[in-house]
Amino acid sequence: MAQTVFQARKVQEGTWLISGTGCDSYLLEGSDEAFMIDSGMDAADIRAFAQTLTPLPVSRVINTHSHFDHTAGNGFFDVVYGTEGIARSAKNTMGANPADYRLDYTFTIVKDGDVIDLAGRPLRVIVLDCHAPGNLAVLDETHRILFPGDEIETGQVLLLPGYAEEPGQIHAKSAATVETYLHAMQKLARFSDRFDTICPAHNGSPIGKEWLSRYITLAQKVLYGMEGKEDCASESYNASANHFPRPDAHYRRAEYDGASLVYCRDLIFDTDYPKAPGLRPATDLHILCKDFARQ
């Protein structure tokens, strides 16, 4: 396996973005320790790299969601935080060889509204449950930064089904509806007076808080039937990578003012769940390999 070359840059004083891991992870400094948000998708020791950036000890990490590009480095940390939904599939390696990773860790479960005590810098957990089951955002009110994981970004937000939680499953849960996503964004908007900056996990960081308003408007336009009209572009979504939905899975992409949402057209409103034909879409990388190790 090729060794990852980690890269880092300061987002602001006491906050580092670490790239080269499959996602943008973040290192946050408190008064007497530092803390990680997401651990990337590499077998290399991201904790050791983070430790070169700060004199403060780095021993804890929180996952914004369960996808392996955010959880692969968890085993290097002493404490790993996540929701129950995150913990259920965080060790699904998405096709990578499990033997290459440290999977012998357990989760410390957090819930919506919990505050993680990073001395001088408390971190609020906001559970969203959209991009992946049990996913969360982290709000740093002291430095006025929102870390939304994959729920807000300048590329595209994907409403994917839950990856498998047991050997032999295709996936564990249907994708979130557009209505559920809208409610999640409106939930974040209730905290909008407590942050000025958004630090996503992909496609550029930091970005302005106006991106939250763009995604709220985009979701509303899809719900109100304005997709493909006026300023809300729309097209069928054909996967270019095998961990995205297959072309026959009824997915679409809607765009508004730079925001892009990829969703299952069978799952617009929450009431669509009984009508949706099964748990779609399935992809090969939702399936757990036989060597998957559960705790």
Image: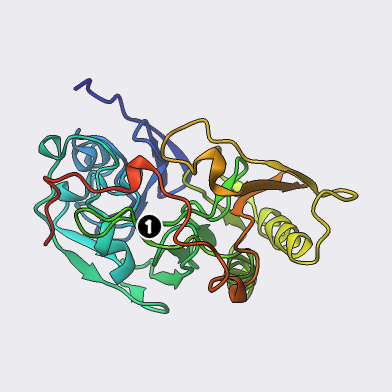
Q: Quadrant of residue 95?
A: top left
Left or right, 219 with reference to 272: right
Seen at 34% across and 50% down, the residue is 38
Q: Residue furthest top?
A: 2
Seen at 13% across and 58% down, the residue is 294
Identify the residue under disc 1.
65
Q: Where is residue 17 in the image (x, y as percent from the top left)?
A: 42, 41
Q: What residue type is labelled 1?
A: His
Q: Residue furthest right?
A: 230
Q: Quadrant of the C terminus?
A: bottom left
Above/below status of 8 relative to 150: above
Left or right, 241 with reference to 58: right
Q: How many labels does the image show?
A: 1
Note whether residue 205 is visible: no
Seen at 22% across and 53% down, the residue is 168
Q: Quadrant of residue 133?
A: bottom left
Q: Position of residue 9 (x, y in %)?
A: 43, 35
Above/below status of 269 relative to 261: below
Q: Where is residue 218 in the image (x, y as percent from the top left)?
A: 73, 57
Q: In which quarter of the image is the N terminus?
A: top left
Seen at 50% across and 63% down, the residue is 130
Q: Where is residue 75 in the image (x, y as percent from the top left)?
A: 15, 49
SS at circle 1: loop
Left or right, 240 with reference to 222: left
